[in-house]
Amino acid sequence: MNKRDFTTVRLAQGEMHIYDFGGVKLHAYQTGDPLTDEVFLVEKAGKLVAIESPCFTGSVAALNEYLAGLDVAGVLVAYHGAGAAFLPDAPKYATANAAEYARSGGGKALIDQFAAVFGGGFDSSIHPVTHTLSEGEVTIGGIRFVIHQTAEAFDVEIPEINAVYTHMLGHDCHSIVAGSSHADAMISQLRGYIGAGYDLILTSHYTPEDLKDAEAKIRYLEELKTIASSCADGESFKTAVRERYPAYSGENYLDMTAGFFFS
């Protein structure tokens, strides 16, 4: 599946890119919100399962409208626990650690931070988890998923479309990298994706990507570690990274990465 092979539907806010795999469709929602979040819906035999939730009131309303009258079997709430106005009556699925991450862990700290910055435009209400997931296979709405627990939440493999969902990739934008060991873990994960031969890598902060993008991200992470080893502080690190990657977006993520490398 080519990552650019989709049809586009305009929503009241943002737009939907629809990938047709035959018996299964993937709806990739570009929210158009201040964090440029992405939400995914897998559709099979008239049922849909959402992966993640929009967190801003405008994108929540737009996606709720798009799904009105459709049969949504559930929402996989991984790294984005806010936005409980999204499909409030649908079953919500999460691992125990993901639920904790959103209620009182690092996810809750981010939710509070975004609420302070964006005010009423950000829906800080947290999804109530109705079904607790564990590592391994689960079938929701007739669609098979494979849950892979991570340190903070969980990733989702979608075998029927040979795709995997993880929190962040972004081959030409900065990501939150919590130090050298985290970079190594990300590299290991991406090499695993390459070895598995996935057609698409889905993330909640970028459009669907492919294995060439994973290779580009590995090179970026290796370079990030090299730059960090030659810098004395966060400011010189950010300056050097900007010089090396002048066209990269995600400046706020670079700020956070610098804070981790030079705490």
Image: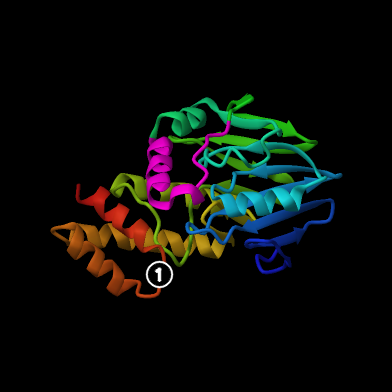
Which image quarter holds the N terminus? bottom right
Q: Position of residue 25 (x, y in %)?
A: 77, 53
- Residue at 18% across / 65% down in the picture? 236
Q: Residue at x 59, y 27 (%)?
A: 129
- The answer to whether one can see residue 54 in this image is yes
- Tag 1: amino acid: Tyr
The residue under the point 43% across, 35% down is 151
Reply above or below: 80 against 209.
above
Vertical side of 44 occupied by 169: above or below: below
The range drawn in magenta is: 106-127
**In the rendered image, which quarter is residue 238 located in?**
bottom left
77 and 222: which one is in front? 77
Residue 20 at x, y percent in the picture:
78, 59
Could you tell me which secondary element the residue under label 1 belongs to?
A: loop
The chief SS type of the magenta part is helix
Q: Residues within 10 Å of mark 1 (few under 14, many from 20)?
A: some
How are the colours assigned in the image?
rainbow
Residue at (62, 49) in percent of width and height: 60
Residue 134 at what x, y percent from top left?
A: 59, 26
Residue 145 location, quadrant: top right
Q: Is residue 53 above or below residue 58?
A: above
- The residue where tag 1 is placed is 248
Name which quarter of the figure residue 199 lies in: bottom right
Give the side of residue 80 with respect to residue 8, left or right: left
